[in-house]
Image (cartoon, coloured by chain):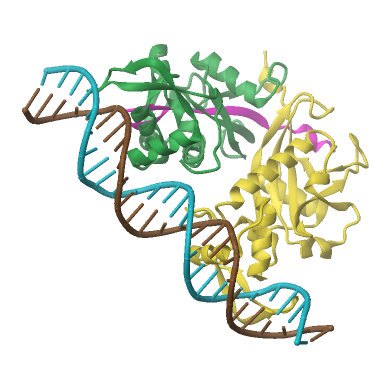
Chain colours: A yellow, B green, C brown, D cyan
Amino acid sequence: MATELIRPILTVDVVLLTLHDDRIQVVLQAREKAPHAGQLALIGGYVHPEEDPSTQTAAARVLRGKAGLSVRVLEQLMTFSGGSRDPRGWSASVAYYALLPHRDFAARGDASLRMLPVAEAKGLPFDHDAIVAGAIQRCRRRAAYSSLPAFLLPPEFTLPELRRAYEAALGRSLNDSAFRRKIDELRMIEPVAGSLSKVTARPAQLFRLTKANVVEFDRTV
Amino acid sequence: MATELIRPILTVDVVLLTLHDDRIQVVLQAREKAPHAGQLALIGGYVHPEEDPSTQTAAARVLRGKAGLSVRVLEQLMTFSGGSRDPRGWSASVAYYALLPHRDFAARGDASLRMLPVAEAKGLPFDHDAIVAGAIQRCRRRAAYSSLPAFLLPPEFTLPELRRAYEAALGRSLNDSAFRRKIDELRMIEPVAGSLSKVTARPAQLFRLTKANVVEFDRTV
DNA sequence: CGAATAGTGTCTGTGAGACAGTATTCT
DNA sequence: AGAATACTGTCTCACAGACACTATTCG
């Protein structure tokens, strides 16, 4: 008997997160095909073994192909599996989360994409509610000891913007002066010489990350 | 064209960890079949969609079926995928890590199983070196803010034993009095009334976990 | 008694919250 | 001038490391 030939469906799903109105929001896409055609769901698709070197690249391909987006942070969350999560049969979906500056989402202007605050993204098809919840929980944990929330912002940002990104990711407010002290000590960012952001009453110094990738700290932020 | 019918291989692999000689050790199994027959590798096997409700239960089934073991902690690490990790074709392996008290391993006495300190478990087939490294890293992180290391011990243990489990998991030594203070404040364990462990010079109070599952703390241990 | 391990009490430094206060720009 | 936001300085408290000290058992 060749039970190993009965192979399950393998897909990827991306929880695309952004920051708007001081809240973490998830970007969903209206499904083109059955099952659940027309409903908002995570951006996802089949893994194509013949063209995808890994599920990571499959997720990047799906993000680019279905939403026209590329992101600086795309990290694996975990794999969701079972016989009842997809009516097409027993399936495993490798879930990823991605972080996108809101301006990149706004610039795209894709009618199939919708942005929703995570608290309002309920009742999604498949087990996408659980996947979104898992991504938020992971990001919250990871925000506490890494530069992750900075990737919700454009490459140049002010300290108040960075603090609000951390507050949104962590789900709690932070003490401003303590935050500045820690960010300074962690050597996470560097000032952009001579440039100021002028969107608020008093212009603020612009910073950029010292590292292009997410860095983890020993201490908590 | 029906590219979605080309389905990859889906397997599970378990990084089974235990504590011995004050070091984290990984339990490996000699492979019965090709590829890499006879070599030590992670305990793993195919996912069977017709009988496994999820990859989690598949991992538990493989652990029981191939090693005769059941564990109190079995958590998903992440999924490793690609066309070159397994000579049989493009595959995805959902990796899990499990924690086992050493006495349970010793009681089993299975000749196909070998225990190795993680530093010496190198040169494994497939991408199992990377999977082991990922599991160790995840456990180290998780040990810092959870009761995870306690599951390397039998249900009843002393405070010095618990501290050594944390030290092995974290990879650094801990201050004894600070450790006792924190464990006390975290309400993680409770004394077993009137029982003492007598394996050391001075008998020590026995404790057990207050919760059967891994609990996470706000503070670090 | 001395060795070995278990367990306690106390000092001190560091890091983070609180918050008052100053700086700069706009209307 | 006053509102709004950016930024700084300082006080204090809680927590964790260090470490000296006591307790209990064994040989």
Left or right of B113? Residue A120 is right
Left or right of A182? Residue A162 is right
Residue placed most toward the observer, B179 or A213: B179
- Which span of residues is magenta-colored? B1-26
Residue A60, percent from left and from top = 71, 51
* Residue appearing at x 75%, y 56% in the figure: A18
Residue B192's image quarter?
top left
Residue A165, percent from left and from top = 68, 59
Quadrant of image for the N terminus of chain A:
top right
The answer to whether any part of residue B167 appears in the image is yes
Residue placed most toward the observer, B160 or A157: B160
* Residue appearing at x 65%, y 26% in the figure: B55
Image: B211 above or below A53: above
Residue A176, percent from left and from top = 61, 64
Say whether residue B3 is magenta: yes
Instruction: State whether the magenta stretch is mostly helix, strand or loop.
Output: strand
Q: Residue furthest right?
A: A38
Residue B150, percent from left and from top = 45, 28
The answer to whether any part of residue B132 appears in the image is no
Left or right of A157? Residue B168 is left
* Residue appearing at x 36%, y 15% in the figure: B195
Image: B221 above or below A106: above
* Residue appearing at x 81%, y 54% in the figure: A67
Image: B103 above or below A201: above
Say whether residue B37 is magenta: no
Residue D25's image quarter?
top left
